[in-house]
Amino acid sequence: MDTRCLWRPELLFVALAIVPTPSVADSFSSQAIERWLAQEFIHSTLAKSAQRQELQWFQHAAVPYRDLTIHVVSEDIPTHRYESEVLARAFYDITGIHVVHEVTQEDDVVRKLQVQMDLGINIYDGYVNDSDFIGSHSRYRQTLAISDMISGEWRNITLPTLALDDFIGLSHVTGIDGKLYQLPTQQFANLYWYRHDWFTDPQLKQRFQSHFGYPLGVPQNWAAYEDIANFFTNIVKEIDGKQVWGHMDYGHFDPSLGWRISDSWLSLAGANDLTFSNDKPYNTQQGVGDWGIRVEHCHPVGASVTRGGALDSPAAVYAVETYISWLLKYAPAEARYLTFSNSSEYLARGSIAQQVFWYTAFIPNLLNEELLSHNDMPVWRVAPSPRGKYWRSGMKSGYQDISGWTFLRSTPKRRAAAAWLYAQFVVSKTVSMEKFLNGYTPIRQSDLSSTYLIDNAHKWGGLLEFYRSKARDYWTPTGLSVANYAALSDAWWRHIGRAVSGHQSVKETMTQLANDIDQRLDKLKHDDMRCPPRLNPPQAASHWLERHGAPWPADSKPAVPKTLSYQEALLLWQE
Amino acid sequence: MARVALVVCLLLVALPVAATIKLLIYDYPPLIAIKGQAQPSGHAIELIKPLFLQAGVPYQFVEQPLRRAIYQAAQKQNYCTFPVIRTQQREASFRWIGPISINRYGLYGHPELHHKLVTLNDAKSYKIGAYAGSAVAEYLSQNGFSIDQTNSIEQGLQMLKHSRIDFWVADTQSIRQASKTANMAKLSPSLSFYTSMSFMACNLETTDSDLLALEAELKKMYLSGQAQQLLHLSF
């Protein structure tokens, strides 16, 4: 591995500004390869000669497609900006295939994908789509199974050094039939974030201890999180003359409100079954998984408690009540009017003590002066997420967003083939480490095991510790139980919004949401798909609540708050 | 505010009495052409007429400026407007039917100058003009571009012709018509960089059965290829 140039976070945007400029003479030539190797693809687990070989392979494989301009799309996070602005240009210089890599809002990506799936219009030649759609891709017959393509039509245009077994998120892009439907290009986790400098301040520690009777530290459950939120918002109130808050969140009525809850918040509360896992063969599993949907032998059978689901179970109601209560009591007043996007800018201002639900894709925003110490180290850390009172060991521990290259059958074969080459380029070992250094969304074990990343791990506040641990397998995306993500997902924000605005109780809201999801599932049973929904007949809620497993009965006992030191908390990821 | 009803009021006497949907439209060639026309025309109009007819939903076109159209459609039952870009901010305020059009936007340079663009970032050092208030102008501004906004497509093309801007931003359909009007040689994009879909935004209280019928009919029109033909889609 080449480590000649020591990477520094403040150089992130400078790097984008000094993207090598091509000259016409060296395009699609060995000079183009040498220029990109020398100026951009500095850090890699491959030796320079092996990088060169990979790039030469791309150059050769692309020859039949050189006349093409292809269009691909992804959501707007720093990793995809890097792909769009730097890697698409490198790919053009090296191969001659012109890739227009659009970045847009996540809901726009989903809408376009849905239109192409429903109507067969080839809007894009490749999509970077969340693996939350894996239940849809592998049920409907609109998406190419990449594993089939690699062993068939794409055999000669599949990078010999692609090394699928090096990808850390492959199990989450594998469908109900065991086939690979998406190629991971980035992944990020939803973790607990906090101000390590404040949590280790002797005066603040002493005040917390004397007020609550236990040490200020990384909260292990929601009870401790709430005490810490209350401590900073209502007791500490100001640090260095600046108002501070003990919690940050968002609650504006728009589609991103749905993700706030549907990205495993109910699972963190403890609504799921203990044994439900995406790692076991899907058709052998029974129980309640993501979104409170019960699955039996690969068929979703219901979301409401009366059908064996858990979407309106006591744990789900507790989860949403807690979210709303914290938003109103401990977050800045404007938080309830913010969205996923604009709330993400808030931590960078340096006035928030902790956030229970934080996406690591936003790490680049936090490597700013406000949040770096005098020796350029972050003053914050990420740690295992605290869990709600229904959570038990063995349940899902958190959410992870994995986005993968996805190709639809409606795309002309030649265009899909060119897009496949680009997809492999942006995940190749030649470029993957530089991509990590620009977006912090790792995809390859080889990068995570590299001396360079390990030596620099202290700069990223615990991110690498998470991704080098087993925990990354327990922070999972929306699983296979969601049979059609696009058709079901808007139910979340449309219903939850009524509870956030106070127009109706959380209990009423969750009952309506569960019934709505049941009705939508019932409608989907007529679609041409594998493992379609087959709703259980409704029964008295007690029938399900009195059995062992989810949906769990109401637990009125308050949880005992518990905290750990940062080092102790990290050990939990190793277990 | 009341506006002059432009043309069509379709009464389907054989069906149970259904509320007429007011379709608020604005000049947006080539999807909708109103200025100087006795009746509205354009690709989107050609799609909407058979769509409503086949779905059995009575309708009436009413001219309104875009901003007022969006406001009124959000406020009044059985009002819809199109074409509207479906953003996260607007999502909760309407029921949506579509897509009513799909367009690819490009950066068009002076035909005698040949600026090479590979990524959108390459255009950052150039002077770029765009139609004021358009979704694509907003997209570029959000991406850190400084845009000269113009009040008409024609004005933008004149600026391009006289090299007061390096690139004009337009969708592939409107540029064809506008460049003819501006008497410029056929322009081709230096870079197609953004794809947008527009929809019909309907009031939340619009009759459910009408919207379901329109949705189903539009899907049929796409699957048969009729919609693509009427919209002149090149995808």
Image (cartoon, grey):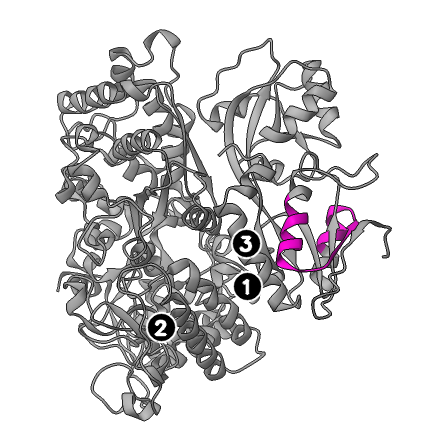
User: Quick one: quadrant of the N terminus of chain A?
Assistant: top left
Q: Tell which of A132 and B216 is nearer to you.
A: B216
Q: Quadrant of the C terminus of chain A?
A: bottom left
The residue positioned 16% from the left and 44% from the top of the image is A445
Q: Could you tell me residue A47's position as x and y percent? A: 13, 25
Question: What x and y, as percent, mark residue A29?
Answer: 28, 12
First in sequence: mark 1 vs mark 2:
2
Callout 2 secondary element: helix
- The answer for how far apart the CA atoms under marks 3 and 2 are is 31 Å
Task: Please state which amino acid type lies under the numbered disc 1.
Answer: His
Marks 3 and 1, how far apart at CA:
11 Å
A86 relative position to B2: left or right = left
Q: Are marks 3 and 2 on the same chain?
A: no
* Residue at image point 39% right, 66% down: A524
Which one is nearer the viewer's eye here, A158 or B116? Answer: A158
Helix, strand or loop at label 3? It is: loop
Return the residue at label 3. Answer: B88
Residue B26 position, x and y percent, is: 75, 44
Residue position for label 2: A225
* Residue A248 visible in the picture: no
Residue at the disc numbered 1: A252
